[in-house]
Image (tube, rainbow, N blue to C red):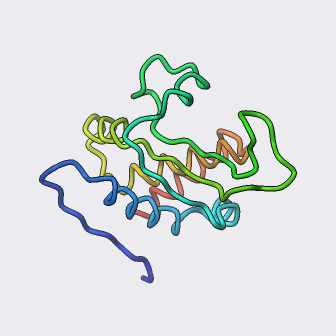
Amino acid sequence: MDRQQIIMSFNVPPAPEDLQVIAKSAIESLPEELLGLCEGLGVQVEEFPDETTEQEFGLEDPYDMVALFRSGSQISPGVESKVANDDDVLFIYRRPLLDMWCETTEDISVLMRQIIIEELGANFDFTEEEIDEMTRRHYQGML
């Protein structure tokens, strides 16, 4: 088996740096149909979405958003530039993720990968069925 496995034991909640490592590892093991779309994808871990993002998505509670993909070609929400100015970035929101982790008691690396599959799948216009199928394959690969 040629799969890297990160084993982390936490006595305190994972720091942003820990989550960054977990997210990068999850991205490296994404399903092929997503992996091909993620070249140069950056990962940024923030505590919560910023105010602009909260307003843009109409969030009533900052805990409602766990991850957000931002295309480097996006000038503003829904407006694409013909030339990308920056790399694509996947934002992981630490506090909402930690709440979800505590509620589900799922292994945090498994949870992170599922969240990333769902966020990227939705942003790259995969159907719900395709995203569900990628997630199922993900869990089968973990057994």
Q: Is residue 139 visible?
A: yes
Figure quadrant of the N terminus: bottom left
Placement of 13 over or under 137, stated as above or below: above
Nearer to the camera, 37 or 51: 51
- The image position of residue 10, as x and y in percent, is 17, 56
Image quarter for residue 64? top left
- The image position of residue 130, as x and y in percent, is 67, 47
Residue drawn where x is 68% and y is 57% of the image: 86
Nearer to the camera, 128 or 52: 52
Figure quadrant of the C terminus: bottom left
Placement of 14 over or under 129, stated as above or below: below
- The image position of residue 114, as x and y in percent, is 47, 49
- Residue projecting furthest to the right: 82
- The image position of residue 92, as x and y in percent, is 45, 46
Residue drawn where x is 65% and y is 62% of the image: 38
Describe residue 28's horizontal placement relative to residue 36 as left or right: left
Nearer to the camera, 115 or 106: 115
- Residue projecting furthest to the top: 60
Placement of 74 over or under 11, stated as above or below: above
Total marks placed: 0
Residue drawn where x is 51% and y is 21% of the image: 59
Residue drawn where x is 26% and y is 43% of the image: 105
